[in-house]
Amino acid sequence: MRRAIYPGSFDPITNGHLDVAERALRLFDEVVIAVALNEAKHPLFDMEERVALVKASIPALQGHERLRISSFDRLLVDYAREQEAVAIIRGLRAVSDFEFEFQLALMNRKLNSEIETIFLMPKDNYTYLSSRIIKEIARLGGSIEGFVPESVRLALARKFGS
Amino acid sequence: MRRAIYPGSFDPITNGHLDVAERALRLFDEVVIAVALNEAKHPLFDMEERVALVKASIPALQGHERLRISSFDRLLVDYAREQEAVAIIRGLRAVSDFEFEFQLALMNRKLNSEIETIFLMPKDNYTYLSSRIIKEIARLGGSIEGFVPESVRLALARKFGS
Amino acid sequence: MRRAIYPGSFDPITNGHLDVAERALRLFDEVVIAVALNEAKHPLFDMEERVALVKASIPALQGHERLRISSFDRLLVDYAREQEAVAIIRGLRAVSDFEFEFQLALMNRKLNSEIETIFLMPKDNYTYLSSRIIKEIARLGGSIEGFVPESVRLALARKFGS
Amino acid sequence: MRRAIYPGSFDPITNGHLDVAERALRLFDEVVIAVALNEAKHPLFDMEERVALVKASIPALQGHERLRISSFDRLLVDYAREQEAVAIIRGLRAVSDFEFEFQLALMNRKLNSEIETIFLMPKDNYTYLSSRIIKEIARLGGSIEGFVPESVRLALARKFGS
Amino acid sequence: MRRAIYPGSFDPITNGHLDVAERALRLFDEVVIAVALNEAKHPLFDMEERVALVKASIPALQGHERLRISSFDRLLVDYAREQEAVAIIRGLRAVSDFEFEFQLALMNRKLNSEIETIFLMPKDNYTYLSSRIIKEIARLGGSIEGFVPESVRLALARKFGS
Amino acid sequence: MRRAIYPGSFDPITNGHLDVAERALRLFDEVVIAVALNEAKHPLFDMEERVALVKASIPALQGHERLRISSFDRLLVDYAREQEAVAIIRGLRAVSDFEFEFQLALMNRKLNSEIETIFLMPKDNYTYLSSRIIKEIARLGGSIEGFVPESVRLALARKFGS
């Protein structure tokens, strides 16, 4: 049994994240979506909300019965070890992503050489998609249909009172 | 008649921005410099000041009689459509610019496929020029002559009390 | 009347090139697709074939009556000046594209400051498309439907005897 | 049972490649090192030699009994499908790698959406290692110990008569 | 006598910084580590602490008797001129570093053409090391041994109460 | 006495190379321009011609009496050690330069840890300048004045019979 962990802020989860999770499910027996607390980043949604939005979004995924959702506020590699994961999943969209992710992955390997970081590509029409851009569009009243699950769309509408 | 929109924070406008605007004027019948509110970025100059500095800077540009100045606080593509623009102008200086601009442009195309984003290069000795660096130099008492119009130089001197 | 020139090897033309040409037609009164001789690159198709494939491909484009096709074997900026073009069009797909194109554009500006290089983005599902990859897939017997016009597909099939 | 394919020219195989293969073995039940013919690249070693050097190098790898070696001269995705692989493995070292690999992976996904490309990072002291640099050092009489398996070192010495 | 200045926030100094300083000492007669105030960045350690940590860290360096430590809160090029430095030293780790550093260096050259910026590479196993990542690991209770000098490790432990 | 080596193909030398050499002369007591044989690259000018063009170009440089010219056909680090150089000089213009140079420098450090690679920036209006582009412009009959020394301009005119 091989388990992979897919960490992130998921503030909020987008269709790009869901696409990466579904791809990971084809490669591993179990996938854990692990929501990082990340308070320093001043997330729009608090931990409880972010976890709830992930939970509401995954039933549509193929293989979702092998998907677990959790949250953590510690060193990723320590959490991954505790979860007995063999791999950390990261989505790559652009060169700037790549560099930071690369540094992070090298550092994580230094901290725990038993866990491999693997990079997956989201669907090509999700390459311009990020939680940050979604929040900006929603704040300005633009349409985010097709970019996020319906529950996220509603939650953003509530946040921005539109 | 083809109109292009050149959006930005312009906090404050630099000679690099003016150079891009002048190039756009050669390609389009009318160019709108559109100052974005962008309060989340905590601009040094408020909206009114930024618009005033743009206004004070443009009479020197060739073709400035076909240049309009405006401000907006909404989704760029919605504003561009309302202005009946066929193109959004963006200046490109470096690879890091490029990636973010690219994602933004793809997203804007998704939101409104009728408006094309086009990228122009500022003059090569403006490649290292940004509003952020200008403010940093001014704050530390360095000379910014040749990088910004005179009115901007004075406004920065007033802000930093030098 | 504003004319733009869209230069390239077009060895052979792909749907990505056609997409860029169609976008340029919305921005300019006339667009010239200019096939560069580029013998040093050992093109798969000779000049005559490349021009013929472009010609066969363009009737489907919106605005194609304002599109001209030509070929040249000289300095691009000299050819652009002769054609009385105000702009050189280049498609940008990726960071590596960007850097080389940027250097070229700066050099062209140095050689002729009156002609502006402008960068357009092809449709996002063409970002992984290049003449080189198309030729490689065709050579190995893969399907290139949806990536090139029908006439190009047939010409590649003839070349690779499949 | 999940099988992954690790394609490349392997001209010749380096310790960086072996490191990636070993990492892949931890993630998949079976890994196929697939040597691509790639005659257009004018490889230094012919197909038979490259396969033999891979074969001589792998007994040292942990999990090598789940490793197979093959060669192919066709579209990678077609070969991967025939091999019933769920994933294509690629090593990533640098930004320039990343961009090309990304385009290739997107194209491969278009050609066969059932096979996922996953990216792994070699050990950090292999980031500057490539078959091309190894051949250049060997040609100039430098020491390549620690960069390639012993059999490859000897084969290069024979090629360059040193 | 040639003096170089090595500026930075050093919040806190890492083994990567020390490695760069040691390399600079081989190339120049005297090296000044210059701690920038940078209050806008909200440093974790105040100026006094950062200088003290640098001081505690350097006795281990080869050539440290030619190393001086100072702090500054003004334009870097003005400070460098006052110090009669011929060069500004910057460590480069990644492409994203490179671009920003490049712009900064071009701007500094514009402001003072007599001082050359030179770029050095830290040891390869420090490429993923940054003050930011170190602070994040320390905050989450991870081990930072081998990444920072002992005095820094203790200071971080005190800050994060672990 | 500190000596640096500035290696390259110099096929042919450009004003960008000369600018880097002049900067190096300010930082080191002696600089050796070392022309690499590089026959695999099929240089336009043979070794003798390239050395002669460098020799003809340097009298204009400030500090040229501390400049030596040589050629080599071996491992750069071996040659640098023989020359008792403490540093290898490389000019950096763009991100793509940077990555390849970085890999090369890390490899060279592995091969000889006593020689430091340092990166210098050419003048900003030489960022788009390369020997390859110069040859292309000259071949097509364009003007290369201001980009190369007069002797190089004449040599290129003779090569391309213009």
Image: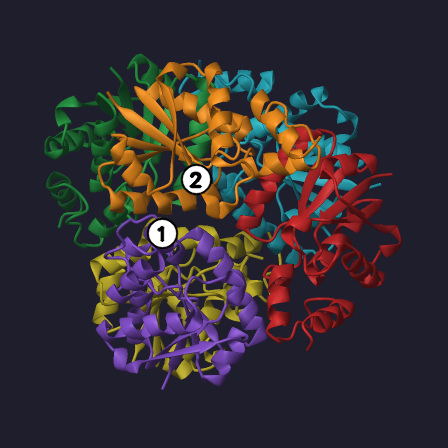
Chain colours: A yellow, B cyan, C red, D purple, E green, F orange
Compared to E105, does B1 lie above or below? below
Q: Nearer the viewer, residue B37 or C80?
A: C80
Residue kind at label 2, given as amino acid type: Leu
Q: Mark 2 falls within which chain?
A: F
Quadrant of residue A120 within the rendered picture: bottom left
State the image coordinates of residue F83 (x, y, percent, origin top left): 28, 30
Q: Mark 1 falls within which chain?
A: D
Q: Nearer the viewer, residue D107 or C155?
A: C155
Q: Are marks 1 and 2 on the same chain?
A: no
Looking at this rendering, what residue extends furthest in the right direction?
Answer: C65
Q: Residue at x 30, y 31 (%)?
A: F87
Q: Which residue is mark 1?
A: D139
Looking at this rendering, what residue extends furthest in the front direction?
Answer: D161
Q: Which mark is residue F37?
A: 2
Quick check: D147 left or right of C27? left
Residue A113, visible in the rendered structure: yes
Q: Residues within 10 Å of mark 2 (few under 14, many from 20)?
A: many
Quick check: B42 left or right of D49? right
